[in-house]
Image: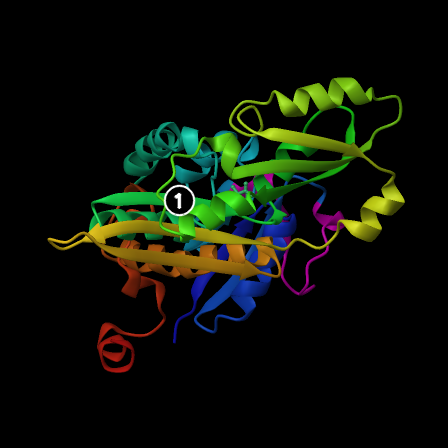
Amino acid sequence: MTQIRIAIAGYGNLGRGTEAAIKKSPDMRLVGVFSRRDPASVSLIDSTVPVYSMDDIEQYQNDIDVLILCGGSKSDLPEQGPYLASLFNIVDSFDTHAKIPEYFSALDTPAQKAGKLALLSVGWDPGLFSLNRLFGEAILPQGETYTFWGKGLSQGHSDAVRRIEGVKSGVQYTLPSESAMARVRNGELPQLETREKHTRECFIVLADGADADTVRNTIVTMPDYFADYDTTVNFIDQQTFEAEHSSMPHGGFVIRSGESGADNTSQVLEFSLKLGSNPEFTASVLVAYARAVHKLTQNGETGARTVFDIAPGLLSPKTPAQLRKEML
Ligand code: API
């Protein structure tokens, strides 16, 4: 079997999770990791895999089938994505929901020009949750869809707070409103504002000399991430941070509450995730979709795609015949 040659761009929590997920996929091989840090300072799970400088990535075009982008959505991906889409077939987890249409176009043009495929916004939300929102709405056109996250650590929001000047370490937890969830499960079909479904809680270690009020204000007013929510910001010391905030659990629910038939029979579709590690799970989704990208590029497909465009059978290492026999 020829293994799919995968590389990783960016080696934080998501990059590390991706390395681990590739190891569990016998049809793939990790050919290298690209980092903006000094390659000598990046330590992988498997020390035999080479680490290269991101500056040299152009030289490796013939060695990589699919490049998995593991940078953050706030500043890394908008900058790296369009450039890397002009050189490689890529998969990323861009998760600023409001900016996805714009980012799609930013990848589509260079990817089409270069004859490459770019799959964006893969993970669990956006990603698996998006698919379940689509299923619910398409199958039960009369009804409401609700998404609840947490309690858990959002990588996107944590990355966004860490980029604020004066923040040394930081995490963000998303908390669902238990009463809102109970009303939805009860079939009440409530109209809920963003603020009524979740609250957000940050734990921040300030850098020396940073001003707490300035940092708090920058967080709670940040558009796309915090402005539409009630956010609590707690300041703690580095030791407490390391002791209490180093695991990264997450999860959530997509619920479609709808009606069918002449008598409007109630039907509830619910998809849920309970994740011990948010980045490791997101990485596992990225890796399965990298397999799909590889298959599609073999058929000559180019341009930008989202999870809505990818047939589920392509995620599996099994052949269509095997899938029909074993899994239908
Ligand atoms: C939240 C969710 C998390 C989605 C998962 C992923 C992440 O507010 O907790 O950033 O961890 N939007 N996109």
62 magenta-colored: no
Q: Quadrant of the C terminus?
A: bottom left
- Please give the name of the residue rendered at 26% of the width and 79% of the height, measured from the top-left corner: 322
- Please give the name of the residue rendered at 50% of the width and 66% of the height, measured from the top-left corner: 29
- Please give the name of the residue rendered at 75% of the width and 52% of the height, measured from the top-left corner: 246
What x and y, as percent, mark residue 56? 57, 41
User: What span is colored magenta in the figure?
Assistant: 39-57
What x and y, as percent, mark residue 122? 43, 48
Q: Residue 323 is drawn in which quadrant?
A: bottom left
Q: Nearer the viewer, residue 143 or 130?
A: 143
Q: Nearer the viewer, residue 286 or 225?
A: 225
Callout 1: SS: strand
Q: Quadrant of the N terminus?
A: bottom left
Q: Amino acid at mark 1?
A: Tyr
What residue is disc 1 on? Answer: 146
- Furthest-left residue in view? 262
221 vs 239, left or right, is left
Query: Which of the colour schemes (rainbow, by chain, secondary structure, one colour) is used?
Result: rainbow
164 vs 134, left or right, is right
47 magenta-colored: yes
Q: Nearer the viewer, residue 198 or 82?
A: 198
